[in-house]
Image: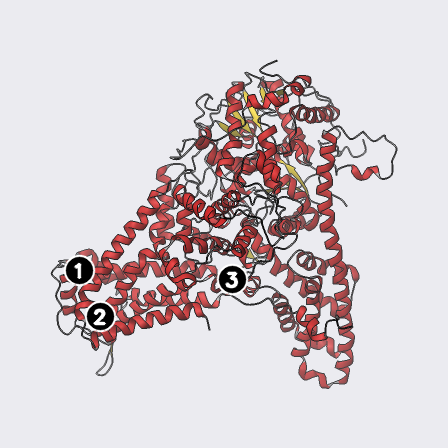
């Protein structure tokens, strides 16, 4: 039994029970619906600011981009503008490729043909799953903005429409699947999380390097997606009441409407835990990627001088000291010297 | 004859089993990499090993040409001679084939002809293992030689710079030739 | 009789399956052939580095200062503040495993702790324990562990099994650069005197005499004169290089390995011929320096401070001699330092001119601040403008491939210039497979000060991926010469080739240029710079 993920799984189960019993048995709607969300958001904002400020406080003494393409040198040699950017504008493009397309992760998969056929590559699925996961998550977040806005902006409605483009509707007297429209993002998110989890326990070297902290967010996000899907398609919650609560939260007039359903509170609690956990975990890679000195600096350090804020004078061995030691031998060998 | 046929029939299974066992001499996470990464340049150890085992398997059936065996065995041993293995670990993988055959062909062993043939076959595997040991020792010697060469070249140059080396007269002086560093950059020792 | 092991004991001794346990529970065994000897305390002392002492990695007791944990903790803290890279790389790894199988040491040794992610985790675990709330509270559950002696030994062992080649960094979605982490780890070791001799002694030599080998000025000149004699014999032309010449146009700096070790010496002879040609044909005045006679910078494998101390000689000498700009020879990490550190550390070089080739008029825009141009850039420009009289058929006995040295590849992006040069001075050239060259190039396995003799197994296993790709073109196209622009490559690859791909030699790019270069007034050449007969001259 793998201790690393068991701890994380148990933690998520405990959190589920906490929220479920807290609302269902102890009637702590106020705590789970208002107090914890506020605390979590505060922790998220403060934590992220603290972490990013922490990184920003550290100096960037040298310009050390990883150059992944031909440098700009002689005019007739074609530089690789974006994998080895020379100008700040090109760096922006490189960063967009990194952040939006996971360029470096994709490099993993760029492979060769072996004996006429493309070699089987497990890695491409990491790139695919990572992209699917992040974009699905983004879509889900954008969709949820409808709960915090009134009237709902057109953009969010558009995202919703696109997301629920595929409608599988089975409408009989007994089964009613497809009402409401099926959101692709939720399913993709669930599938991608499952893949990332399975990858962590199936591929031995990934399993070997994994920490409990790698499993916890996966389980948590799985829990969030799962409760979300549960609410939407199976154990229907009162969406009007839920929106009343969320709008109350953002307008700082919190209320606890009746009859939302306990699954909503569990869902909300999971989200709160994720928010509060975010700044203190590896999830901060989201902010970190923008600050990475091997990616966000131009490879022009020979053309434009970079200044090190803490550059300090060091002990050196001067030419005078050198000549002092070797003068006679230098003269004998016919080497020019400063002092005869 | 019957055994050869059986072996050829089960070639793929046998080689897979043999290879799996060899790969299990590495840490478990490394083993999966060695098996999964099919690109020969990204995974030279796994691919060299697999290719070598396939060729050795054929050689065992068709007959042992010493030169051919060496050419297939050498690349595998050359790698294992450097890695974190004792001499027995580095070479004993040859013997894993016996177990693989026994397990795969267990149902065929009621036939006395097969058993006799298998005993012969086993001694061929033993020979292979001994040859592997020879190669192993040669590789180790090579490593020490390379070390000595580098050391000698550095020292020689230092002596030369310090003016301690007198040019050797044209006639061969035994023993002194050793001091001359390789001229073409390849140490042909 | 009783000393003889029982059969089952014997069997358990040769149990071939490695244990399956968490990496934190796998103790480190420092294996012969995989580590470098401890530094000679005298070398450490000469450069005033901290805590010089006699110690042996195999000993139980490393004779550390009593408060070594405190020293390392403070050192760690300072570096987190000084280097955003370090702090970020300690924080944001998600352990996706994309880098895991990209390291030549992992590929070659199969040791899981050589996966870049795990190598970094070795240090991250200590970071979490000392500097993060989660690590302090949850301990091992958060992947944290205290820095014990065992852990220190593990760190030392594995951070001297990284050549700072940066291959893993190009695959990392966050650009986490193990080279950067290794540099920090080695800075920390340096604080408690845990240097290796192959780095510390060259550093001390370089500091004192200007080059790694401790060659004194007169001997340095002697060595070049020795080459001049050889060249005269081969070409019939006497080349006359300048030494420490004030008012020369250009100062030339190259790694001292080229001056003393085969086959780098032939590259050095190549430099001499090229500069002679340019002087005769175009009046270009190049000077060598005995003070700044080392391009390579083993200080960069010690600490940023030591890197700066050694590098300072380049600008100091250029200023003293009053040259216009500096030309750099073929070297790997020397160019990482020049390209990404020198100007910041020891600049601005406002006493030099923005580099312009006096022969072609080309402005080297990409070097206008640092004022140092790479010889391959310079030569490629000369060839493009038809300024060199070349006979590539003189290299027809060679079938070449090109090894992208890690630092010019991933710390600079120099790919096409050397290839252009090679293809103009030789007729037979084949690249190795695409995932082993250019930005994905495999290290020689001996970089970052690891090209010692005692760690031969490490070097040969680390070099396997590179050698394997060479073997492929050797078998497929008959490649018999591996060209490169790095002095460590020229020192390490011959050994590597000898073990893995016998029959392949190693050369610098400029040696190939010099073979093809037709000097004004030269006699008929019958041999190349190595004294081997030229194609068609075998019977002469």
Give the chain of mark 3.
C
Rendered residue at 41%/61% (across/down): C139
Camera-near label (3 vs 1) is 3
Q: Is residue A220 above or below residue A82?
A: below
User: How is the structure coloured here?
Assistant: secondary structure
State the image quarter where residue C202 is shown: top right
The reply to the same-chain question for discs 3 and 2 is no
Query: Are circles 3 and 2 on residues that touch, CB within 8 Å?
Result: no
Give the chain of mark 2.
A
Camera-near label (1 vs 2) is 2
Mark drawn on residue C221:
none
Q: Is residue C528 above or below residue C450?
A: above
In screen coordinates, is C215 left or right of C368? right
Q: Which residue is mark 3?
A: C23
Q: Is residue C459 above or below residue A224?
A: above
Give the x, y percent position of residue A205.
50, 62
Picture quarter with the N terminus of chain C: bottom right
For disc 1, the neighbor class at 10 Å (few under 14, some 14 to 19, many from 20) is some
Name the secondary structure under disc 1. loop
In screen coordinates, is C11 left or right of B67? left
């Amino acid at each position: 039994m793998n201790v690393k993920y068991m701890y994380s799984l148990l933690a998520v189960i405990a959190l589920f029970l906490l929220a479920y019993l807290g609302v269902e048995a102890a009637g702590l709607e106020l705590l789970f619906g208002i107090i914890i969300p506020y605390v979590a958001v505060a922790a998220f904002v403060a934590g992220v600011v603290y972490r990013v400020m922490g990184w920003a406080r550290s100096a960037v003494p040298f310009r050390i981009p990883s150059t992944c393409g031909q440098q700009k040198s002689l005019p007739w040699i074609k530089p690789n503008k974006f994998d080895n950017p020379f100008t700040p504008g090109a760096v922006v493009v490189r960063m967009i490729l990194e952040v939006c397309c996971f360029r470096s992760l994709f490099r993993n998969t760029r492979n060769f043909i072996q004996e006429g056929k493309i070699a089987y590559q497990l890695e491409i699925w990491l790139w695919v799953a990572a992209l699917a996961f992040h974009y699905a998550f983004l879509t889900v977040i954008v969709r949820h903005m409808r709960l915090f806005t009134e009237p709902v902006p057109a953009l969010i409605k558009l995202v919703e429409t696109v997301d629920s483009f595929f409608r599988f509707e089975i409408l009989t007297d007994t089964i009613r699947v497809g009402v409401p429209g099926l959101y692709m993002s939720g399913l993709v998110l669930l599938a991608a999380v499952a893949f990332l989890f399975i990858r962590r326990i199936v591929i031995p070297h990934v399993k070997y390097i994994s920490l409990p902290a790698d499993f916890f967010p996966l389980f948590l996000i799985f829990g969030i997606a799962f409760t979300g899907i549960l609410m939407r398609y199976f154990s229907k919650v009162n969406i009007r009441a839920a929106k009343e609560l969320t709008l109350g939260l953002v307008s700082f007039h919190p209320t606890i409407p009746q009859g939302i359903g306990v699954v909503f509170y569990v869902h909300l609690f999971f989200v709160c835990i994720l928010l509060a956990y975010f700044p203190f975990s590896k999830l901060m890679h989201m902010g970190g990627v923008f600050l990475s000195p091997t990616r966000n600096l131009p490879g022009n350090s020979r053309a434009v001088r970079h200044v090190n804020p803490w550059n300090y004078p060091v002990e050196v061995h001067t030419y005078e000291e050198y000549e002092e030691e070797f003068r006679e031998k230098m003269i004998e060998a016919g080497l020019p010297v400063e002092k005869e | 004859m019957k055994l050869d046929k059986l072996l050829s029939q089960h070639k793929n299974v046998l080689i897979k089993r043999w290879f799996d066992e060899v790969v299990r001499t590495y840490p478990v996470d490394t083993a999966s990499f060695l098996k999964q990464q099919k690109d020969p340049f990204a995974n030279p150890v796994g691919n060299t090993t697999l290719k070598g085992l396939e060729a050795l398997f054929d050689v065992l059936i068709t007959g042992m040409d010493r030169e051919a065996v060496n050419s297939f065995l050498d690349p595998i041993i050359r790698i294992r001679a450097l890695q974190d293995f004792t001499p027995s670990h580095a070479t004993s993988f040859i013997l894993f084939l016996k177990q693989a055959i026994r397990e795969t062909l267990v149902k065929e062993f009621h036939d006395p002809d097969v058993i006799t043939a298998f005993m012969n076959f086993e001694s061929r595997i033993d020979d292979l293992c001994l040859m592997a040991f020879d190669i192993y020792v040669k590789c180790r010697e090579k490593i020490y030689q390379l070390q000595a060469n580098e050391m000698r070249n550095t020292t020689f140059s230092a002596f030369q710079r310090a003016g301690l080396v007198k040019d050797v007269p044209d006639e061969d002086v035994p023993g002194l030739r050793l001091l001359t560093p390789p001229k073409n950059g390849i140490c042909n020792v | 009789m009783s000393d003889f092991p029982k059969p089952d004991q014997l069997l358990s001794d040769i149990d071939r399956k490695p244990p399956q346990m968490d990496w934190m529970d796998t103790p480190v065994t420092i294996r012969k052939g995989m580590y470098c000897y401890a530094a000679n305390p005298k070398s450490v002392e000469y450069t005033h580095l901290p805590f010089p002492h006699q110690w042996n990695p195999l000993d139980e007791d490393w004779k550390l200062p009593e408060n070594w944990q405190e020293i390392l903790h403070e050192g760690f803290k300072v570096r987190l503040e000084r280097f955003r890279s370090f702090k970020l790389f300690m924080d944001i790894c998600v352990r996706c495993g994309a880098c895991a199988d990209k390291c030549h040491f992992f590929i070659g040794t199969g040791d899981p702790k050589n996966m870049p992610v795990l190598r970094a985790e070795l240090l991250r675990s200590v970071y979490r324990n000392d500097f993060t709330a989660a690590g302090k509270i949850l301990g091992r559950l958060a992947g944290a562990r205290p820095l014990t002696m065992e852990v220190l030994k593990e760190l030392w062992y594995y951070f001297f099994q990284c050549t700072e080649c940066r291959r893993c960094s190009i695959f990392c979605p966050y650009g986490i650069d193990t080279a950067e982490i290794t540099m920090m780890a080695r800075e920390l070791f340096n604080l408690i005197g845990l240097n290796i001799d192959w780095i510390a002694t060259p550093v001390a030599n370089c500091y004192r005499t200007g080059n790694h080998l401790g060659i004194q000025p007169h001997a340095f000149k002697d060595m070049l004169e020795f080459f001049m004699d050889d060249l005269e014999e081969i070409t019939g032309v006497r080349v006359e290089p300048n030494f420490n010449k004030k008012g020369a146009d250009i100062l030339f700096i190259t790694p001292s390995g080229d001056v003393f070790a085969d086959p780098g010496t032939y590259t050095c002879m190549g430099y001499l011929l090229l500069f002679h040609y340019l002087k005769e044909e175009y009046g270009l005045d190049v000077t060598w320096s005995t003070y700044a006679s080392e391009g390579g910078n083993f200080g960069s494998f010690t600490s940023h401070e030591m890197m700066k101390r050694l590098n300072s000689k380049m600008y100091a000498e250029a200023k003293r001699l009053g040259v216009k700009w500096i030309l750099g020879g073929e070297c790997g990490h020397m160019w990482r330092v020049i390209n990404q550190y020198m100007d910041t550390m020891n600049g601005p070089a406002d006493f030099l001119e923005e580099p312009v080739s006096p022969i072609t008029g080309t402005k080297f825009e990409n070097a206008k601040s640092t004022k140092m141009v790479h010889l391959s850039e310079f030569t490629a420009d000369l060839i493009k403008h038809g300024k060199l009289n070349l006979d590539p058929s003189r290299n027809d006995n060679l079938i070449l491939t090109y090894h992208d040295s890690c630092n010019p590849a991933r710390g600079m992006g120099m790919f096409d210039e050397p290839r252009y040069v090679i293809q103009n001075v030789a007729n037979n050239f084949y690249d190795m497979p695409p995932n082993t060259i250019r930005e994905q190039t495999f290290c020689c396995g001996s970089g970052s000060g690891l090209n010692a003799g005692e760690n031969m197994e490490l070097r040969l296993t680390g070099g396997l991926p590179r050698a394997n790709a060479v073997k492929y073109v050797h078998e497929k196209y008959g490649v018999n010469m591996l060209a490169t622009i790095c002095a460590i490559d020229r020192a390490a690859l011959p050994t590597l080739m000898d073990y893995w791909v016998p029959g392949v030699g190693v050369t610098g790019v400029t040696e190939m240029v010099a073979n093809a270069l037709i000097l004004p007034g030269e006699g008929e050449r019958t041999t190349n710079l190595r004294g081997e007969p030229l194609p068609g001259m075998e019977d002469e």
